Image: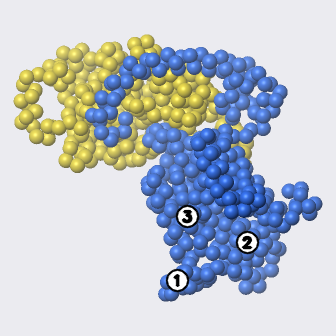
Chain colours: A blue, B yellow
């Protein structure tokens, strides 16, 4: 931020920073659905497009009706409304779509993105040709470029904080529980449908916000932004950074925005190097750069000042609330547990035959 | 006798043309430990799935503490007070031992999304309370020292215990244990037995137990129901069951058993 205010950043650097901020909002919110909830969705850019078009059209409407308001206020207002509209669509799509999972959900959300694209293409007021014409629409142009890097930076910070706080609460735990085992989650009293739709809606909301920023930064919109190629780009960022890690999402969003720019020197080999980098990361770190690791200031401070006690890092939440004596005790207990685990493997080996037989006789029952 | 914890009447379910369970009747009083046994594929786990709302019964009804439960969703049934464990352990593997228990506390603590995001005093108070309760619960099972361990790294026996601890955390009145001793060695089974005794004493809950380990069943259960081909073929005290000729026939087979089956079209197939 400092470079911007002192004026040393060129327009080019500013544009990269803006794109990175939008990518961070998209990636961290998508990470909540893909990484934490464990549901693969490919429709995030559909929500982004809804947010973008809502914000753009609303901004135009306000100007057309002669409403006078501060630029920043107008920017924030239309962006948030864009987010809310995207959120409503998130709920509407989420309720039927989240009955499915895995590949099926991916396909449904993929289809959703395409539907949004086609609808926008045909809406006259969104620059389209009109439903009766049936041809590709044009870009929506002339949107006021109100996005200011300073404001956008703080929106990004708020997004990350909100998502982080959500993740570190009973809701975050519940969502992770659904990812690990949905049947056990509902057997623990969680309303899984409600939680899944809620996560989907939160993701959609922030995607809409990112869309609103995008619209008011670029100044023109095309329906193509809702296509699946763009969605997959963000999915790559989530996977690249590590599923379930907000830190990973932020780093990979910045990295994968900056990398193609840094590679401009390679001219036509640019995208090749980019792809190779992706492939290499997936081969050598299939869990993503950060896995599910999360940056934590208390942990970092502990590591610097108490390097010896780091053998027992397990639950970052309790790292600071527990007494030191208790910590060392946990460490000892864990070591014994590891020994026991080795013995436990031997035990379960002996009894393997029995469950296998059972599984073959009991069909699809929940066991 | 007061109202029983669980009362099921003529409970049954049909998958396509197959009657998996039919005319299942059971009453479980407060603090009772009832066993449910039967050969593989007899429909024991299906009964559990019916009682926890995973399947909707196609016939009959059941009540928890006098409240009708049939047709409710799993999470509603769990909140009303029926919790279960699974035959194949289902833990939240990538979460810590403590988090596994905390998830089950979720519904008993009321802070909302706003509270979580703004970290209100209520959020902190409830989170601390949850944490304390979870550790207290884990202590009963001797798992408090492992609170920060990832659940999938626990040895088998302790995974079972954690699953029971998680079920207890939902604050239920009736606990359904689906083959808790499956795959355990004798020491672990004994350990488990001790656990069951302790939690019964401490929480005063009723337990319905599916088990293949006959010594365990005969030792702990006050009453036993025997299920075969989706029907209760016998019920009574462990001694009565052990000497019941029908039960022995179901488990070991007998000459006239085969003839009986041939004449009974509905039950001809197992799941």
Q: Nearer the viewer, residue A82 or A272?
A: A272
Question: Which residue corresponds to the image point at 72% horizontal and 78% vertical from the top-left?
Answer: A143
Question: Which residue corresponds to the image point at 89% horizontal and 58% vertical from the top-left?
Answer: A3
Residue A156 placement (x, y as % from top left): 74, 57
Residue A37 placement (x, y as % from top left): 55, 47
Residue hosting label 3:
A228
N-terminal of the pair, mark 3 or mark 1, is 1
Residue A169 seen in the current view:
no
Mark 1 closeness class: few <14, some 14–19, many ≥20 residues within 10 Å? few
Q: Are marks 2 and 1 in contact (CB under 8 Å)?
A: no
Quadrant location of the N terminus of chain B?
A: top left
Question: Which mark is drawn over residue A218?
Answer: 2
In the image, is residue B215 above or below residue A209? Answer: above
Q: Are marks 2 and 3 on the same chain?
A: yes
Which subunit holds the residue at mark 2?
A
In the image, is residue A286 above or below residue A81? Answer: above
Question: Which mark is drawn over residue A135?
Answer: 1
The reply, left or right, for residue A226 in relation to residue A70 is left
Which subunit holds the residue at mark 1?
A
């Amino acid at each position: 931020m400092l470079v911007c205010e002192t004026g040393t950043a060129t327009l080019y650097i500013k544009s990269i920073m803006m794109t990175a901020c939008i990518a961070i909002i998209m990636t961290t919110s998508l990470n909540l659905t893909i990484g934490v909830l464990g549901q693969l969705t490919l429709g995030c850019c559909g929500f982004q497009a809804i947010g973008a078009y809502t914000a753009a059209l609303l901004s135009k409407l306000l100007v057309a009706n002669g409403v006078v308001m501060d630029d920043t206020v107008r920017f924030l207002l239309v962006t948030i409304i864009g987010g809310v509209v995207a959120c409503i669509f998130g709920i509407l799509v989420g309720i039927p779509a989240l009955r499915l999972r895995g590949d099926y959900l991916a396909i449904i959300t993929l289809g959703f993105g395409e539907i949004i694209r086609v609808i926008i293409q045909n809406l006259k007021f969104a620059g389209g040709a009109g439903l009766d014409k049936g041809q590709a629409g044009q870009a929506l142009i002339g949107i006021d470029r109100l996005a200011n890097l300073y404001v956008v930076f703080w929106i990004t910070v708020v997004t990350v904080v909100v998502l982080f706080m959500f993740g570190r609460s009973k809701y975050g735990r519940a969502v992770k529980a659904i990812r690990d085992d949905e049947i056990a989650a509902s057997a623990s009293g969680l309303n899984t449908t409600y939680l899944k739709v809620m996560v989907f809606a939160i993701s959609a909301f922030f995607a809409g916000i990112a869309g609103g920023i995008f619209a008011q930064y670029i100044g023109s919109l095309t329906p193509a932004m809702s296509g699946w190629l763009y969605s997959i780009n963000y999915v790559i960022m989530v996977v690249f950074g590590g599923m379930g890690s907000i830190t990973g999402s932020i780093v990979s969003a910045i990295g994968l925005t900056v990398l193609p720019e840094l590679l401009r020197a390679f001219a036509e080999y640019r995208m090749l190097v980019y792809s190779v980098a992706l492939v290499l990361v997936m081969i050598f770190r299939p869990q993503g750069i950060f896995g599910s690791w999360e940056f934590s200031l208390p942990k970092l401070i502990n590591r610097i000042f108490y390097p010896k006690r780091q053998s027992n890092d397990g639950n970052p939440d309790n790292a600071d609330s527990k007494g030191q004596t208790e910590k060392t005790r946990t460490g000892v207990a864990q070591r014994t547990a590891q020994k026991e685990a080795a013995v436990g493997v031997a035990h379960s080996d002996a009894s393997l035959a029995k469950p296998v037989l059972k599984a073959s006789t009991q069909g699809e029952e929940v066991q | 006798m007061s109202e029983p914890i669980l009362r099921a009447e003529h409970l049954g379910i049909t998958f396509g043309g197959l009657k998996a369970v039919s005319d299942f009747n059971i009453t479980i009083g407060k603090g009772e430990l009832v066993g449910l046994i039967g050969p593989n594929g007899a429909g024991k786990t299906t009964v559990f799935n019916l009682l926890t709302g995973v399947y909707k019964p196609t016939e009959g009804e059941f009540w928890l503490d006098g409240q009708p439960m049939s047709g409710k969703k799993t999470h509603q049934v769990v909140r009303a007070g029926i919790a279960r464990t699974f035959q194949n352990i289902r833990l939240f593997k990538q979460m810590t031992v403590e988090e596994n228990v905390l998830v089950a506390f979720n519904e008993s603590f009321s802070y909302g999304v706003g509270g979580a995001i703004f970290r209100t005093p209520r959020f902190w108070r409830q989170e601390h309370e949850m944490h304390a309760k979870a550790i207290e619960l884990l202590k009963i099972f001797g798992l408090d020292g492992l609170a920060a361990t990832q659940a999938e790294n626990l040895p088998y026996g302790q995974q079972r215990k954690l699953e029971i601890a998680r079920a207890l955390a939902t604050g239920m009145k009736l606990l359904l244990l689906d083959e808790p001793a499956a795959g355990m060695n004798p020491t672990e089974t004994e350990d488990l037995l001790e656990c069951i005794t302790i939690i019964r004493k401490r929480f005063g809950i009723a337990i319905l137990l599916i088990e293949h380990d006959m010594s365990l069943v005969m030792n702990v259960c006050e009453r036993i129901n025997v299920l075969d081909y989706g029907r209760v073929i016998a019920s009574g005290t462990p001694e009565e069951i052990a000497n019941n000729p029908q039960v022995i026939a179901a488990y070991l087979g007998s000459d006239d058993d085969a003839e009986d089956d041939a004449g009974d079209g509905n039950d001809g197939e197992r799941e």
